[in-house]
Image: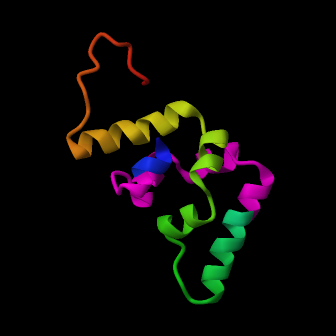
Amino acid sequence: MLGVGLDQKLLAPSQLVVHVTPEVLAHHLPPDAMTRVLASALSAGQRGEQATPERLFESLSPDVLVDSVPLEVLWRCLDAAAERAGIAGDRSGEGGHS
């Protein structure tokens, strides 16, 4: 679902970083994924470019995020995207994901 949300532009990298914070990434990413993130940021800096959420998620696929980031964090991202798109259902009484 995360990949579809990104592909369909229902969810943007700038919206992901609201919940998938640097602290979450540092605590949960495997070392090889963290190495890619740091290498990408350093490379951008050497070229005089800014490290952006878009650049961050160029080096992290949705599969890596799903395998590494706690699901409750990803659900918050998807819930927020559904709210913004006006497609969130009434979850009262369902227990929700929060």
Task: Pick the quarter of the image with the C terminus.
Answer: top left
Residue 94 in view: yes
Q: On the rendered structure, is 55 left or right of 79?
A: right
Instruction: Identify the coloring.
Output: rainbow
- Residue sitting at 79 percent across and 53 percent down? 31
- Residue sitting at 38 percent across and 13 percent down? 95
From the image, give the main secondary structure of the stretch colored magenta.
Answer: helix
* Magenta segment boundaries in residue numbering: 6-35
**Magenta includes 21?**
yes
| Viewer-proximal residue among 45 and 5 | 5
- Residue sitting at 55 percent across and 32 percent down? 71
| x and y percentages locating residue 79 in the rendered image | 35, 36
Specify the farthest residue to the left: 86
Residue 18 in view: no
Q: On the rendered structure, is 64 left or right of 72?
A: right
Specify the farthest residue to the right: 31
Give the vertical position of 96 relative to 7 (above or below). Answer: above
Q: How many marks?
A: 0
Give the vertical position of 5 relative to 40 (above or below). Answer: above
Specify the farthest residue to the top: 93
Residue 91 lies in quadrant: top left
| x and y percentages locating residue 96 in the rendered image | 38, 20
- Residue sitting at 61 percent across and 82 percent down? 45
Q: On the rendered structure, is 22 left or right of 90?
A: right
**Magenta includes 20?**
yes
| x and y percentages locating residue 58 in the rendered image | 57, 66
| x and y percentages locating residue 48 in the rendered image | 56, 89
